[in-house]
Image (cartoon, rainbow, N blue to C red):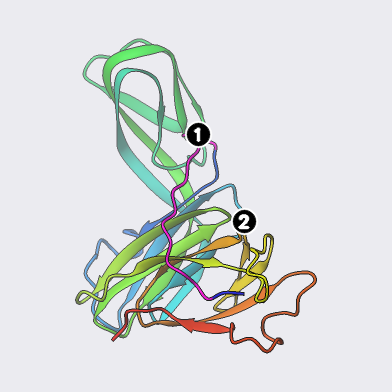
Amino acid sequence: MADADKTLVVRFGEDSADRSEISVELDDLANEGNSDFAPGDTAFLRVHRWPQDIYAGFTNANSLSKVATGVVYQVTEETIVWTNEQEKTLDFRPSGGVDYSWVGADPGINISFSGKKIIASNIIKAAVMLATYKTVGDRWSVSANFEGRAVIVMIMGDVDSATQISFGGDAIEPVDYNLEVVDYCTGDILVGATVWFDGVDIGQTNNLGIIFLGLLQPGSQHTLKIIKAGYLDSDVDNIKNDSFTVPGGS
């Protein structure tokens, strides 16, 4: 089994409003509009996901925890611009109905909603819609005792989302990392190996023997546990593969 190695990941797929998705951003409601934080402060994040699958959060900050689930957020007058289109997508998945109005002339076309999709009965040549609705998400808290940027990554299956929060300054630029798991003797990739990263089960390696770890801060230290049928668990074998330090720290 191998230590983590920096890789470039490119995903291809249909741009569908019904695909698995996760997003993380500052929670303006809980932060009372504040976006400037000092070392030792607590910042709040909102996480939206579809479907409601298990997901995990990772950070280079000192603490990250989920503090509430099923938080209702009000989205007021989201602007949707139509230009020779018959379908658009809302920023978030509504919980309940969507109220909408038109800026200027009403195009006189029937509108329906399905998940995040906005579907018009005919092509709308040019119009601006304002949509108001409620959406439901989870609230997380994050704090850092250092001066710099905290990177937060949320991972659900093969989709992820990341954001950064400044705690009074800039830190060393974080780097995307994947973990490749291989047979120590043969070098063959190991598909379907279960990976525990910093004590959290983040899933299994794909058909290339790779799993995404997220944005990692250079110099940070992390623990690993890898399980695969036919092999000793990595925490009981004699190979030094239970932890690693991200290269590039001071």
Q: Amino acid at mark 2?
A: Asn
Quarter in which the N terminus is drawn: bottom right
**For the residues marked 2 and 1, what is the alpha-carbon distance in whole angstroms?**
19 Å
Which residue does the image show at 40% across and 82% down from the upper left?
220
Quarter-wise, where is residue 149 in the image?
Answer: bottom left
Which residue does the image show at 31% across and 59% down from the upper left?
28
* Residue positioned most to the right: 230
Q: Secondary structure at mark 1?
A: loop
In this image, 167 relative to 235: left or right?
A: left
In this image, 13 relative to 175: left or right?
A: right
Q: Position of residue 196 (x, y in %)?
A: 61, 73
Structural crowding at the residue carrying mark 2, measured as other residues with C-alpha within 10 Å and reported as few (<14), some (14–19) or many (≥20): some
Q: Position of residue 9 (x, y in %)?
A: 44, 54
The residue under label 1 is 14
Q: Which mark is residue 206?
A: 2
Q: Amino acid at mark 1?
A: Glu
Quarter in which the C terminus is drawn: bottom left
Residue range corresponding to the magenta coloring: 3-18
Nearest the camera: 96 or 240? 240
Determine if residue 154 is in view: yes
Rendered view: 95 above or below 69: above
Query: Do the residues under discs 2 and 1 have CB atoms within 8 angstroms?
Result: no
